[in-house]
Amino acid sequence: MLEIASKTVGRLRSREQAAWWVATLGLMSLRLVELAFVSPKYFPDTAAYLPPQGPLSSFVLAGPRPPLTALVYWTFDQNRTAIIIAQALIATVAWTVATVALISLVRTTGARVTLLAAMVVTSLSAPFLIWDATLLSESFSISLALLVLAAAIRAVQQPSGWRIVALVTVVGLSMFSRDTNAIIFAAAALIVGLFSLARRLDRRWLAASLAVIAMYGVVVAQQTAGHRSRSIVADEVLLRVLPSPSMLAFYEGHGMPVTPALIAYRGSSSRYMQYVAYDPALDSFREWCNSHGISTQLDWTVSHPVTALTQPFRDDSGLSMDAHLVSYIPSGYKALLPISVEHLAQTTRRFLLWGEGLVALVVAIVLARRRTPLWWLAVGLLATAIPHAILVWNAEAMEVPRHGLLIDLQVRLGFIFLGVALIDDILTRRTTRRALTTSQATTTPAVGGGAAARR
């Protein structure tokens, strides 16, 4: 009998999981509707992701951008329509897989439905939908972040060699899609590795950490071979150093050649790839970028820590995607959500980080005594958003809102998870109280009846 009951429960759970998979995939597939209206949007940066040769060429192994997007574009022979279809399909799968993995962390049906609805709304909102039709790395970056989240949940829930390998694989792909991702995951791998040594955890986690750190070494080698640090320093100089007398004096004191030819490019990073990279009058500047640029940038950050740590949150125009979103919207884009919902989903990053932070703190404190996996995940996402924003702002002077898109994603998801965790806690306690009340109601008559019988 016990075996039959166990099999029956297993079938019911399998059917329930299948129902969640079907419902989630069906709703997330609404993203594909957008492909019927939009046209692929090409940007000046797109050329940096289009390799002129095969996948093993120096362009991919040591090109001006991380290699993953270039490899995908090469796979589809640079066919723009095929590329955006592939991006949309991958994004749909990623949002579905992540949502189903998150649902497994929730105990009550009401909270699960709330989580599904919030994830669908976030997925269909413009800040995360438009990138499927743009020829940049953002769509892949978002999809890989969601797959990392799903793989991490599964690997922690039921650790196995294959699940940890899957996690390391998607982490590696994400590292090769954006340079700042590589720094974040390398730091996370170092923490996990040290924690596994201190707590004597499964050695597979230590091996996974070492693998991620090794991949970071490969990314650094690619950055050096492709002179990607030179473009980072050049953007910093053109957009922030030249307009600031104090920064200009600091950089000049560290050997940067300040010439009329360089001053002419002040504030115009969009012309870097076309002119600054090849202008013979800037040969000395490029040599300085290669040899002393990154070290000078780090020296400035260390010697001005207050500016480096607080400026990302004082410059709202630099952090908020709202003011810049329209310039990335592809031709033919039609919002899939009602205007009121769309506006709610497009709150500014400063408000996300600070205004809603107070609410998140209160909820986190309320749930602190009943820590659930979803609570831990929410707190982790929100706690790492601040250093993530500081890293992106200091490492990406050009188009900070676009380069910080994953910050928006992790903060929004952090707030969603806290809210769902609170709802799940309330519903769970209500269900427990009802069960206790029902149990007491069924046992009381039996006691009374026994007393009557004795009389």
Image (spheres, helix red, strand yellow):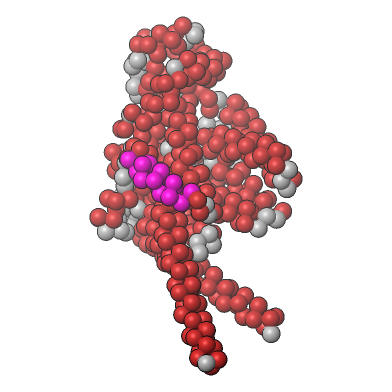
Q: Is residue 435 magenta?
A: no
Q: Is residue 367 magenta?
A: yes
171 lies above or below 11 = above
The part of the image, by quadrant, that contains residue 51 is top right
In screen coordinates, is 125 left or right of 292? left
The answer to whether residue 287 shows anywhere in this view is: no
Residue 140, position as x, y percentages in the image: 50, 47
Q: Main secondary structure of the magenta part?
A: helix
The answer to whether residue 432 shows anywhere in this view is: yes
In screen coordinates, is 1 left or right of 352? right
38 lies above or below 355 = below
How many labels sit on residues? 0
Residue 112, position as x, y percentages in the image: 45, 64
Residue numbers of the magenta segment: 355-368
The extreme left residue here reads: 340
In screen coordinates, is 74 left or right of 246? right
The extreme front residue here reads: 455
182 lies above or below 428 = above
User: Quick one: 434 or 360, which is closer to the camera?
Assistant: 434
Which residue is painted at 32% across and 40% down in the image?
Answer: 355
Residue 162, position as x, y percentages in the image: 69, 55
User: Quick one: 29 or 303, which is closer to the camera?
Assistant: 303
The part of the image, by quadrant, that contains residue 101 is bottom right
Quadrant containing the N terminus in the rendered view: bottom right
Which residue is painted at 32% across and 59% down in the image?
Answer: 336
395 lies above or below 353 = above
Which residue is painted at 59% across and 38% down in the image?
Answer: 188
Which residue is painted at 43% across and 23% down in the image?
Answer: 308
User: Quick one: 242 or 194, which is closer to the camera?
Assistant: 194
